[in-house]
């Protein structure tokens, strides 16, 4: 039977000059870390809590957003006004801003709506009181995005039979159907419908514009069917059978769905 170890043999020897320290236990480490965290919180957060400084806020960009939307709407407005075909202008807009893939514009017809041509419409179209005039009302969409709504009075006798059939039976936009006639477009009237900014905002003080846009913040929120501006235009065909005469009078209302790419 072996002899029991002496005290000097069973205990690790302390280094010279002092006692040997035992490694700290896990519980002690946790307690120490918690104590350090509490101390740091007291040093750095307590003074801030005792101050009367207001909490940090997100910068107000209501005016900047209104200006961005205003600029985009004016750009689309100008693109349509400078084009011989509203359909072609919308197709380019849809492609440039990736509103759908493929960026095809289609006309969703409402066959139940009819508005007889008034004497003013007939005068603009240069037709008599007994000449046939057909009304077509559509929503122009790119994918699921609503770009505009349009009411269109057209003279079927100045279109080919194939064009008339396509307009009756399909969702092809009017501008696409009559493009072979070499169409031109003359704007009769333009109306701005979206009050994003106050009157004479260009010369107003920034504080006034900023306060106004905050008060009308709902006007800058995205709503697809919101009317932005309205055009009235006379479409003329230079090729037979139109022979340089008006073929259609259109009333177009452009919708905020065309600015879906800005909804963020």
Image (cartoon, rainbow, N blue to C red):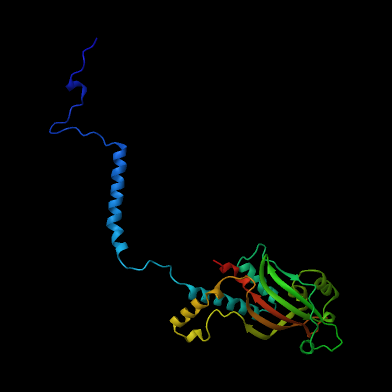
Closer to us: 124 or 21: 21
Q: Position of residue 172 (x, y in %)?
A: 76, 70
Quick check: 72 left or right of 54?
Answer: right
Residue 82 visible = no
Q: Quadrant of residue 111?
A: bottom right
Q: Looking at the image, which residue is at 46% across and 79% down? A: 211
Q: Position of residue 110 (x, y in %)?
A: 77, 72
Q: Quadrant of residue 193?
A: bottom right
In the rendered view, would you say 143 is above or below 118?
above
Q: Quadrant of the N terminus?
A: top left
Q: Looking at the image, which residue is at 50% across and 84% down? A: 201
Q: Looking at the image, which residue is at 30% across and 51% down? A: 38
Farthest residue in the top direction? 1
Quick check: 207 left or right of 32?
Answer: right
In the rendered view, would you say 19 is above or below 211?
above
Q: Position of residue 139 (x, y in %)?
A: 71, 72
């Amino acid at each position: 039977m072996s002899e029991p170890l002496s005290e000097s043999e069973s205990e690790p020897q302390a280094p010279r000059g002092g006692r040997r320290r035992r490694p700290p236990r896990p519980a002690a480490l946790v307690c120490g870390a918690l104590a350090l965290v509490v101390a740091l919180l007291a040093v750095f957060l307590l003074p801030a809590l005792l101050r009367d400084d207001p909490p940090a806020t997100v910068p107000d960009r209501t005016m900047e957003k209104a200006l961005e939307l205003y600029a985009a709407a004016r750009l689309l407005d100008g693109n349509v006004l400078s084009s011989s075909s509203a359909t072609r202008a919308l197709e380019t807009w849809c492609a440039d801003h990736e509103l759908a893939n493929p960026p095809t514009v289609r006309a969703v017809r409402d066959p139940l709506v009819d508005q007889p041509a008034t004497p003013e419409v007939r005068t603009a179209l240069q037709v008599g009181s007994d000449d046939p005039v057909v009304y077509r009302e559509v929503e122009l969409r790119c994918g699921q995005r609503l770009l505009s709504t349009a009411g269109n009075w057209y003279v079927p006798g100045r279109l080919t039979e194939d064009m008339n059939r396509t307009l009756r039976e399909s969702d092809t936009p009017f501008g696409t159907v009559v493009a072979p006639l070499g169409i031109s477009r003359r704007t009769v009237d333009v109306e701005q419908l979206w009050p994003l900014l106050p009157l004479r905002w260009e010369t107003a003080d920034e504080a006034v514009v900023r306060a106004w846009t905050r008060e009308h913040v709902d006007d800058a929120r995205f709503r697809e069917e919101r009317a932005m501006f309205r055009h009235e235009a006379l479409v003329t065909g230079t090729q037979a059978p139109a022979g340089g005469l008006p073929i259609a009078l259109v009333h177009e209302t452009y919708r905020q769905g065309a600015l879906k790419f800005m909804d963020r």
